[in-house]
Image (spheres, helix red, strand yellow):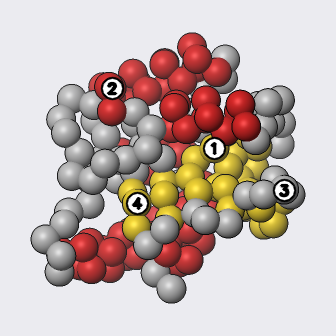
Amino acid sequence: MNSSMLVLWREKIKIIEKNEARFNSKLNAGASNEEIRALNLKFNMKHNYPLPKEYLEILKVINGIDYNGFVLYGADSELLLDKPNQEIQGVIDSNVVWYEFVDPEKKYIFLGDDSISFYVYERATEKYWIIDRPSTDPIEEYQTVDELFNEMLTTALL
């Protein structure tokens, strides 16, 4: 993880936590190592490809988030040992849906979305992208998931 980018998105998480606390709502804690192992194993079994390690590191800090129309997928509910503070969309189930309706070639791993974009990992290039939701045309490329997640949070805080 890029340490400066990690600091940036963690600061944004703190802002969101404060905003949520005003409504007596809490963000999810990070997934445990056991939950992460189970998630990666099940995703790999279902989709024949492991989840990006960088993405799994983010889930150790915050296991999914749904804020201001922005959604970062987390570990699917049946894999969680404890009930999350927020209901989250599971990355396994979300990819099942998006592979059927958006990406049957499984070019991407869908990590999150908002009303106009998908936040994805491109398997062939090992790069992260924001892609247009209706057309799946690439909009913006990122070298790391930290950069992508920082951009997602920046957009969510607008």
- Going by the numbered disc 2, the residue's amino acid type is Leu
Q: Which residue is mark 1?
A: 110
* Neighbourhood count class around disc 1 (C-alpha, 10 Å): few under 14, some 14–19, many 20 upward: many
Decide if residue 87 is on the left or right side of residue 108: left
Q: Nearer the viewer, residue 64 or 144?
A: 64
- Going by the numbered disc 3, the residue's amino acid type is Ser
- Going by the numbered disc 1, the residue's amino acid type is Phe
**Mark linked to residue 135:** 3
Q: Which residue is mark 2?
A: 79
* Neighbourhood count class around disc 2 (C-alpha, 10 Å): few under 14, some 14–19, many 20 upward: some
Q: Nearer the viewer, mark 1 or mark 3?
A: 3
SS for callout 2? helix
In the rendered view, tell whether residue 52 sits above or below residue 79: below
In the rendered view, tell whether residue 15 sits above or below residue 153: below
The percent position of residue 22, horizontal first and vertical second, equals 17, 80
- Work out whether mark 4 precedes mark 2 in sequence or the reverse, and give the earlier one: 4
